[in-house]
Amino acid sequence: MTDAATGPLTIIGDPAAGACEGDSCELPEHREQAIVNRRLDFDSV
Amino acid sequence: MDSVGLDVSDVIKVDIWSDVQCPWCYIGKRKFEAAVADFGGEVEVEYHSFELAPDTPLDFDGTPKDYLAQRKGISPSDADRMLERVTGIAASVGLDYDYDHVHQTNTIKAHELLHYAKSHGRQVEMKERLLKAYFVDGRHVGRIEDLADLAAEIGLDRDEVVRVLTDQQYLPDVKADVAQAEAYGIHGVPFFVFNEKYGVSGAQDPSTFANVLEQVQSERETVK
């Protein structure tokens, strides 16, 4: 990868696929919990 | 995923941002590997650093369940359900997660080690060893001495690993990866970038990865 590779990406795939953001790991069937987690994070800032 | 002997233009480059203590990164790795195994073309993989929780202490005093409770306010029973669920999904792709023995830690040194391994052409092996160490083997992946042991297990020079990690020789490379992720707008991992054009977020089904590989390949053939 070149250091300056910042071009816009074409995003492909299921947006509900499992992923971790911050120290919150979303679970496809528990998205409500992930939202709660983010709210807790926000409140703690 | 070896690209030796091929014209550079025949190889599909996949840059993957992930963290060592990201359960979906290991699951996504297996799903991506399944797609690559079925794909006829050549794929070159490069892992990039992404710190999910850079403020995590080197030695968190507690279990992952304690971590979820303290950091997220999640009840022990809910934490158990979350961990059981991800453990079940991991098992579905052949990974035996052992959350009872996971050592929650800071992963900055593990990322530095991955860059060191890359400089020796062993990054893919090091990534697999670190993920297995953390999720399956109950090994510590934050302390320099433990990381050096893991590096030695795949044939890297233990003493040199201790030296480069102590000296933070590869810290600028970790920071460069993080900056690149920010430039791409990457907020979560795993995140896969195919030939600097297509982005795939999360532990997608192998069919999704396969479709992107086929798409990139077909575009290459059209250009030729």
Image: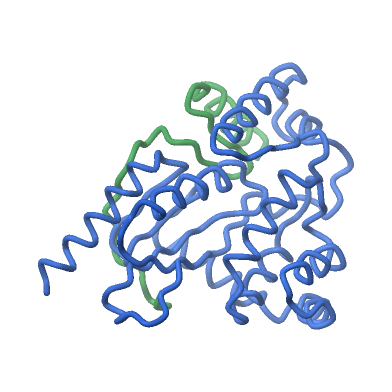
Chain colours: A green, B blue
Q: Name the side, left or right, on which B116 lies relative to B40.
A: right
Q: Quadrant of the C terminus of chain B?
A: bottom left
> In the rendering, at what x and y percent does residue B8 appear?
31, 80
Camera-side residue: B106 or B117?
Answer: B117
- Where is residue B63, by image quadrant? top right
Residue A34, percent from left and from top: 55, 29
Residue at figure coordinates x 37%, y 68% from the top left = B13
Q: Is residue B12 above or below residue A4?
A: above
Against B201, residue B89 (above or below) is above
Query: In the picture provided, is A1 more to the left or to the right than B150?
Result: left
User: Residue at the location (73% across, 32% down)?
Assistant: B68
Q: How many marks can you see?
A: 0
Q: Quadrant of the N terminus of chain B?
A: bottom left
Q: Position of residue B109 (x, y in %)?
A: 74, 66
Could you tell whether B42 is left or right of B167 in the image?
left
Q: Position of residue B33 (x, y in %)?
A: 46, 52
The residue at the far top in this view is B77
Is B168 placed left or right of A15 in the picture? right
Name which residue lies at 50% across and 50% down.
Answer: B190
